[in-house]
Amino acid sequence: MKNFSLSNFFSLLMAISGLFLFFWLLGNQILTSDDLYFASKIRSYGPWEAMQLERELWNSRWTSLFLNLSILKIYHTISPLVLFFYGLFNGILLLQLVYLVLNRFQIHSKILVALLCTFFFVGTFNVGEVWFWLASSTTYLTATLLIGIIFLRLQQPHLPNWLGVLFIVPSIYIGGCSLPIAGLYILCLMFLIIKNLKREQPIHIQWIVLYLIVSLLALLYLLNGTGSSIRMTHFDTISLFDAFVLNFKLTSLAIYTYLLPKLPILLLLSLPLWWIPIPHSAINSRKLTAEIIVIVFKFSIAFFCYQFLLTYITQDIGAARALYPINLIFLWCFLGVIYLANRYLQSKQIPNIIKVFASLIAMSTILVITFQQLNFVNPYIKAVENRNQLFNTNKNQFYRLEALPPSGYLYSSEISVDSNHYNNQHLKSYFNLKYSPILQSE
């Protein structure tokens, strides 16, 4: 009981630190990059009209566009706090997803749920790009979390009718937000249909079929937009075989670029999880090794298949935001390995001093990250505010600007030395400047 209380104590402190970091970053979030472009559009058009225009010119992701533009409309007409509440909504979605997964394993610990939310937040490949860039989070983050929640809910024996009706809206949203995300959702629904066909008494099959239909219709509307065709002209066309061969290289590059840099921090943050009490029996070293090999193999296949779609379309590795579904799967697989290690260590006598020392290391890690972000973000926000005040002072002047300081976990709105760069152009459009500002050359 003493060990359990001590483990919970350190986990609680880590969860509180992670919660503080998340809310503090939410409070400092600003519009950046593409957000400024869409915000300038919303001045002349309503969210639906602006979405339709963009759908025909460049971006056919109509549901994520409409959500993005609607938030920006509220931002400028009601309150900038809408960014905070939208980020909070995504945080609640993550909380619900973690709770549902732990519930499947009959693990009922509120502290562990909060701790894992911190783990998933910090473990994001690029926190700023995924969580604090509105144009990105409305396209990838929200939809991915909703897929996980709906997928898990549809496997539970009971689904309230009100929830079944409610899930129609996110199904439409997911289908029209992005081709890879929509494809993932459709595959998940088809998997559930096949799984139900093997049962004597299928569950929620009518809801699953309905969600599949509405998501397919939303996807067809996405693909029907001329913006998709225009966007595709910027990429080369290669054969499926060439894409398959190239995908080995790009998947390896993506692992090197995104996964490996995160491993040290994830290992440190996961230290308390190695021996936190769980209601499952111990396993031997042979089963531990076999299960880990299976997890690694399944994840490698999932990563390769998801990256293949991006390889075929763009011939490049996916951006961190586009890879967020794989990011989530990777973190769950990582936790799966920790879970197996925990069951293996149940039969071992681990000295309490080692447990305490490891927990202190994990807690120190999240505290260092938090204070590091405080040191990064404060100067960055101040520099952005000073730059914005400068633009509002004289809109007819040509600006050659000093570089912004590092933005930490926020997504940087830095411009380029090239006046034609999209970030420079977005800044010019948003502030109604006569000339496109540029960055000073070093």
Image (cartoon, rainbow, N blue to C red):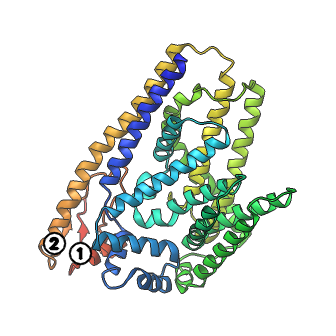
Q: Is 199 left, or right, of 38 in this rendering? A: right
For the residue pair 40 and 45, the one nearer the viewer reads as: 45
Residue 441 lies, in percent from the top left, at 25, 62
Q: Quadrant of residue 107?
A: top right
Residue 143 seen in render: yes
The mark found on residue 48 in the picture is none
User: What's the CA distance linking mark 1 and mark 2?
Assistant: 7 Å
Q: Residue at x 20, y 54 (%)?
A: 382
Question: Closer to the camera, 360 or 244?
Answer: 360
Image quarter hosting the C terminus: bottom left
Compared with residue 14, is residue 429 higher up or lower down, i.e. above or below?
below
Q: Which residue is mark 1?
A: 431
Residue at image location 58% in from the left, 68% down from the top:
174
SS under mark 1: helix
- At which x and y percent is residue 177? 54, 71
Residue 256 as seen in the image, left or right of residue 184: left
Instruction: Determine the image quadrant of residue 198.
Output: bottom right
Q: Which residue is mark 2?
A: 392
Amino acid under label 1? Phe
Q: Are marks 1 and 2 in contact (CB under 8 Å)?
A: yes
Relative image position of residue 132 (x, y in whole percent): 39, 58
Residue nearer the viewer, 111 or 344: 111
Structural crowding at the residue carrying mark 2, measured as other residues with C-alpha within 10 Å and reported as few (<14), some (14–19) or many (≥20): few
In the visual, does 315 lie left or right of 194? left
Return the disc, 1 or 2, that comes first in the chain's sequence.
2
Q: Secondary structure at mark 2?
A: helix
